[in-house]
Structures are given as structure tokens and as C-alpha cells.
Image (cartoon, rainbow, N blue to C red):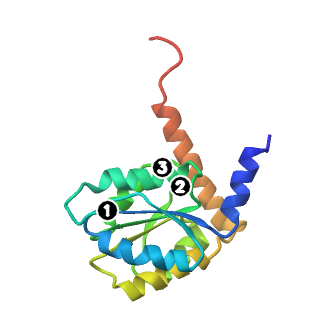
Amino acid sequence: MGGAQDDKRARRRAAPRRVAIGADHGGVALKAALIPFLHAKGFEVADLGTHSPKSCDYPAIGFKVASAVSGGTFDRGILLCKSGIGIAIVANKVPGIRAVVCADLFDAERSRRHNDANILVMGAEKIGRPMAKRIVETFFATHFEAGGRHERRVKQIAAIERTILKRQSPSTTSP
């Protein structure tokens, strides 16, 4: 055991450097403001869409960013829509994702420290650019409290995901 899986775990524990970001039409302007901010902070950022204020459906973008984070291509993700709610629901359908809607610094700090959240979701109609930048800073600067009750609970969430995936996997034998 070990090898690539150990490398993946170590990278997740280290300070995040690779960030996938996505937004629907309601969050595209805030996304455009956050990308240079993240670059200035030293992050490698991949903009996974949308690139226009033209109306689009958020499920495809939420799934794209969540899949990129879940698959280990990116350390963390940021998703934006008008409220943050719908795109968070989509992201949380992807195994291994703990996407949280944050509207203030408390949410950002607590979601990382206690829940090891890996995708930050914000509602662009609820949060101005200055607060969004402060939330991003807090989310990325806060480390998970590994060990103890918080780690035990995050492991329980992962176990629930595995149970659901096992139930959904096709049987290897014919009926």
C-alpha cells in the first residue's frame, strides 16, 4: 500500500496551491475578480467556466469543479452562483466532496477547521467583493483539526459515501 495514495493524502494536508474555480452566470463577475486575487496570493488557478454572463445551468459547472477536486487534480475548489445553494447541492453529490456555502469568516474558518471542507461556495448576490476575498483568504489559510472528534466525523461521512456507492454499484452476478 502507499505510493500514489500516500502522495495524494500528503498533498491534501499541505497548504493548497491548485484551485479549480467555476461559476454560473450569476457568479461570473465575482469569479473574474477572484482569479487575479488568487494568482496574487500564489495559487495556480483553473477557470472551469462559465465565461459569460449569458444564462447557463449551474449543475454542469458544479460537477466539473467537484470532479476535478475529488479526482485530485486540484487541492480545493471555489464555486459561485447567485445564492450558492444550488451549486453546493450539485458539488456535494460527488463522492469525496465537502462543499460549504460560506457567507462570513466564521463559516469559512469553521468549515475548514471542523469539517475539512474542500470546496468553498459563495452566493454572489449576498457577498460583496471585499468580503468574498476575506472569506477566500480565511478558507485557504485555515487548517483542518486532524485527530479527535472532527477527524472521526469526517471519516464517518466518507464511510457513508462508500456505503451508498456500494449500494449503487451493479451486481457482479446476473439475477
| Disc 3 versus disc 1: nearer the observer | 1
Query: Pointers 3 and 2 in contact (CB under 8 A)?
Result: yes
The one nearer the camera, 31 or 161, is: 31
Determine the CA span between mark 3 and mark 1: 19 Å
Res. 69 mark: 2
Residue 126, image x, y percentages: 30, 80
Q: Mark 3 sits on what residue?
A: 67
Residue 99, image x, y percentages: 46, 62
Mark 3, secondary structure of its residue: helix
Residue drawn at (37%, 71%), measured in percent from left and top? 31
Mark 2, secondary structure of its residue: helix
Q: Is residue 125 visible?
A: yes
The one nearer the camera, 97 or 158, is: 97
Residue drawn at (37%, 84%), measured in percent from left and top? 129
Vertical comparison of 16 with 58: above or below: below
Within-10-Å neighbours for mark 1: few <14, some 14–19, many 20+: some
Mark 1, secondary structure of its residue: loop
Mark nearer the N terminus (1 vs 2): 1
Determine the CA span between mark 1 and mark 2: 20 Å
Q: Mark 1 sits on what residue?
A: 51
Tell me the amino acid under the disc marked 3: Ser
Determine the CA span between mark 3 and mark 2: 5 Å
In the picture, residue 86 is in which quadrant? Answer: bottom left
Vertical comparison of 164 with 66: above or below: above
In the picture, residue 57 is in which quadrant? Answer: bottom left
